[in-house]
Amino acid sequence: MESQQQLQDSDKDPRPSLSPIDRQYASSPPQIERRIHVLGTGSIGKLVAHSLAGLPNPPPITLLLHRYSLLQAWEKGRKEVTIQDGPGGAKVARGGFEVELVEEVRRQHGVIVERKKADVFDVAEGARVRPDEAAKMLQDVEKAQPAGDALTAEAGEEKQQPGPTTYYRPGGSGQGDHAYSSGPIHNLIVTTKASLTIPALLRIKHRISRSTTICFLQNGMGIVEAVNDSLFPDPETRPSYVQGILTHGVNVPPETATRDPFFAVHAGHGTIALGALARKPSPTGHDAKDEIWAPSARYLLRTLTRCPVLCAVGFTPTELLQQQLEKLAVNSVLNPLTALLDARNGSLLFNYALTRTLRLLLAETSLVIRSLPELQSIPNINTRFSASRLESLVVTVADKTKDNISSMLADVRAGRRTEIDFINGYIVRRGEEVGVSCVVNYGIMQTVVGKAMLTQREAREDVPMERR
């Protein structure tokens, strides 16, 4: 009861009369946990971790690794993250990081299978039942037994009990066991692909609590809603959220990705727009004094905005939403069209046939955004999100990044799952809510999904070769 009361007290805003911007930058309580975990060691994750480590009196930083091979590369290497300032620029290596290996978690017929726990297919084979029946058996056993009982079944600790718990997967040879952790996570920065957010968070869900703040630095929209629906349906126990919009250009050269997986090139300097989502919605819907941010959210905002390289700036949730929608409109054109054309961003310029397609997409997107209920009380929305202004934004970004390959094109070429569901898919979903039929966005989205499936099938048919 005492710890629960302390947790509730920590969520109370000590200075409710401050404006939303001032409250985001208000000083954090002295007992706030300083350690920051970074989930996703791709190009953006490496840039963020490297920038945080360069601060005076930097916070403790832990990199969450999702593969054992990454842990091996870290332990055998220099244990540093290296960022190169532009092609041919200076390379800066920074250490001092701690690393952890996240638990293996799989979904099998609706059952969450953790590392060294009963496998649905092993149970089905041992009990000679169908996999769906085995999943039902495991669910019944899980409800009837305390957590960590017979289903844990670690190697050498098998419990000889009747039923499905006698059939289990030992869970490998124990490689990397020293790098696993079950300690709580207070400050988490997520830089994975939007489509991988839920599977990645599922692995560390047991370490996230109400006092945790998750900062999403990703493309697309609708991620928070998807995370709440799948992982944190209870508003009283879910973590706090901070959302960010990045304009930095970071890439990992293919020739160094295998040799040094902790190296990246900061090809284009940009900014990060940050905004904390209210811990509790305002009862009136208008009074900003009723909105509450968790102490860890304020700490994370203040820490990120201290990084000169990141150029992070805090915004109110309303302004951040508008900036998110602007970037979404740009990405909904550049990403899918370049992925389908297999061309760089500049290929969309000076091509009237492609301009027609671009304008059809933006006409739908503009109508959906201008119809969103959360924007109706904001002045000048019709001008800011008009189709002509959105087209100007797309052309400007395409010209500035004309030699770049979009992230969606890179994913399609590699046979990876794209973020199309959180870009054009978000527009389609919101269009259905406001009564706008987004047939062009839907058609483009399904075509990108289909092309990604084609490349995935081709990749599966390849004969694996070792590069020398």
Image (cartoon, rainbow, N blue to C red):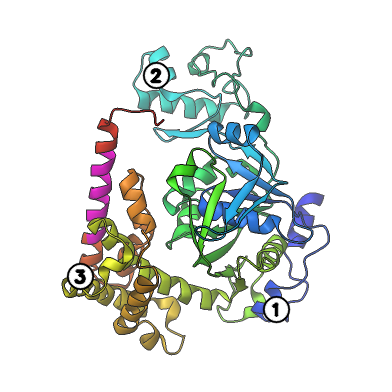
Q: Which residue is mark 3?
A: 354
How much space separates mark 3 and mark 2, taking CA atoms? Answer: 53 Å
Give 357 or 221, whichever is nearer the viewer: 357
Sequence-wise, the earlier of marks 3 and 2 is 2
Q: Nearer the viewer, mark 2 or mark 1?
A: 1
Sequence-wise, the earlier of marks 3 and 1 is 1
Magenta-highlighted residues: 444-457
Residue 117 percent location from the top left of the image: 54, 24
Residue 409 percent location from the top left of the image: 33, 54
> In the image, what residue occupies the spot 47% across and 23% down?
119
> In the image, what residue occupies the spot 36% across and 59% down?
406
Residue type, label 1: Asp
Residue 310 percent location from the top left of the image: 60, 66
Extreme-front residue of the structure? 88
Residue type, label 2: Ala
Which circle marks residue 124 in the picture?
Answer: 2
How much space separates mark 3 and mark 1, taking CA atoms? Answer: 45 Å
Extreme-left residue of the structure? 353
Element assignment for label 2 = helix
Which circle marks residue 123 in the picture?
Answer: none
Element assignment for label 1 = helix
Q: Is residue 122 visible?
A: yes
Sequence-wise, the earlier of marks 2 and 1 is 1
> In the image, what residue occupies the spot 28% across and 56% down?
339
How much space separates mark 2 and mark 1, taking CA atoms? Answer: 57 Å
Which circle marks residue 22 in the picture?
Answer: 1
Residue type, label 3: Leu
Q: Is residue 446 visible?
A: no
